[in-house]
Amino acid sequence: MTDTQLYAIAERQAGYFSALQARQAGFSKALLSHHVKSGRFLRLRRGVYRLAHFPEMPHADLFIAWLAAGEKAVVSHESALLLYGLTDLLPTEIHLTVLRTASRRLPGVRFHTAHLSPEEVTTRQGLPVTTVPRTLVDVLRSGVAEEWVRQAVQQALARGLVSAAALHTAAQQRGGYIVAVIQSALEESNAL
């Protein structure tokens, strides 16, 4: 058992950790419960905790949902746009992409199923998140208004979060409507 291992895990995740991660670091259920009762750990929901001395961070809801869904889940769609700071919209649900075999029952969480390649996932603020090109394609496919996608494209380009070439390539892989909207947003941004 090492406190150091659990602290290292939690530190990368803004102080949050799962019961599974605690067990992997050597904490038994009884020891985990003891630390909750002593106030060292805060139990946020079944299987999700935070080190008490860590302040609650922005996007705490995303950390809690991600850990509750399992470490293979990825923040995506509108939640990814929010994490990147590319939208003023506040999603009514947390959006996570999971493999088809994952359990999908969490209140306030909308699950999307997909196989994401390693190139389509990155890390932002300690959370796994779909890349900007994948996020923009996903929100277009899920029906987010074009004006919000155009705004997100312009902001992502202006802030250097993505290149016009990467957006063009991602759109070409999906074709049709996706290409038209992304192409138009790139033209508006004078990125082509």
Image (cartoon, rainbow, N blue to C red):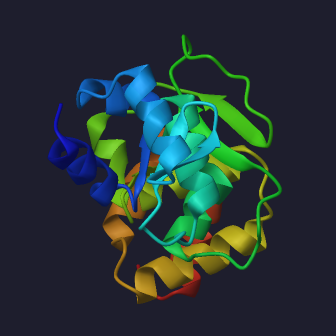
Residue 106 falls left or right of residue 120: right
Question: Can the viewer see residue 71?
Answer: no
In depth, the one of 149 and 29 nearer the eye is 29
Q: Residue 68 lies in what quarter of the image?
A: top right
Residue at the far top in the pictured view: 101
Where residue 167 appears, as percent x and y from the top left, is 42, 62
Where residue 94 appears, as percent x and y from the top left, is 70, 49
Where residue 166 appears, as percent x and y from the top left, is 34, 61
Q: How many marks?
A: 0
In depth, the one of 79 and 172 nearer the eye is 79
Residue 167, placed above or below residue 57: above
Q: Quadrant of the C terminus?
A: bottom left
Q: Quadrant of the N terminus?
A: top left
Q: Residue 47 lies in what quarter of the image?
A: top right
Q: Residue at x 32, y 66 (%)?
A: 165
Where residue 33 appears, as percent x and y from the top left, is 50, 32
Q: Residue at x 66, y 46 (%)?
A: 95
In depth, the one of 53 and 150 nearer the eye is 53
Residue 35, placed above or below residue 133: above
Question: Can the viewer see residue 2?
Answer: yes
Q: Residue at x 33, y 72 (%)?
A: 163
In depth, the one of 182 and 56 nearer the eye is 56
Residue 117 falls left or right of residue 72: left
